[in-house]
Image (cartoon, rainbow, N blue to C red):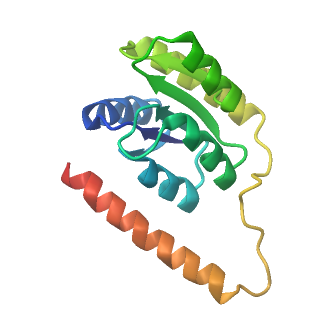
Amino acid sequence: MGSILIVDDNEDLCFSLAAVVKKKGFSVATATTGRQALTLAHCSIIDLVFLDIGLPDAHGISLIARLRETSPDIGIVMLTGMNDAKTAVEALKAGALDYIVKPFDLIEFTTVLKRLMQSRLMKKKPRSNARKPTGNRSSASVSRCVRCIGRYKLLRRSTLRC
């Protein structure tokens, strides 16, 4: 099983895509801002991100590099309402694996989802962002985990209210 993050400021779209992803047997999280997406990516292992280009607090293409800092192996698919070749090329050069123009049908979405997750799961190797166990955990590591859990709970509560 893989883990998917859907990032779009349209909460209805997030909800609908999350339902499709769950139905396909993957775990899923959603975010409506770039900040939420970075927090979730930092606190959990995400295999694939569906990322909207136009977010209220960040440009999706600039988030690609920041997501890769958190997890270099993360797969990213851009979602956008702009059917512009220049933007598509820019996203792919920044490291996106694919580019889906809204509005799209669920067949297109699930095709991309299955293709990329099958490819990722077949190539699965030890994750570069997975922490190697050590004999002694520093208090900084423990403190970071506690902060992540707190942030995740806040994000989860705010997502559930919507």
Residue in front for this viewpoint, 51 or 145: 51
95 left or right of 128 in image: left
Q: Is residue 92 visible?
A: yes
Horizontal and vertical percent for residue 122? 75, 32
Please determine whether, in this image, residue 71 is positioned above or below residue 98.
below
Residue in front for this viewpoint, 90 or 138: 90
Q: Quadrant of the N terminus?
A: top right
Quadrant in which residue 82 is drawn = top left
Horizontal and vertical percent for residue 145? 55, 75
Please determine whether, in this image, residue 149 is positioned above or below residue 27.
below
Residue in front for this viewpoint, 102 or 162: 102
Q: Residue at x 57, y 11 (%)?
A: 85
Horizontal and vertical percent for residue 13? 31, 30
Quadrant in which residue 151 is drawn = bottom left
Q: Is residue 2 visible?
A: no
Please determine whether, in this image, residue 69 is positioned above or below residue 79.
below
Task: Spot the residue most to the left.
Answer: 161
Q: Residue at x 41, y 64 (%)?
A: 152
Horizontal and vertical percent for residue 126? 79, 51
Q: Residue at x 57, y 59 (%)?
A: 42
Q: Residue at x 56, y 82 (%)?
A: 143
90 left or right of 16 in image: right
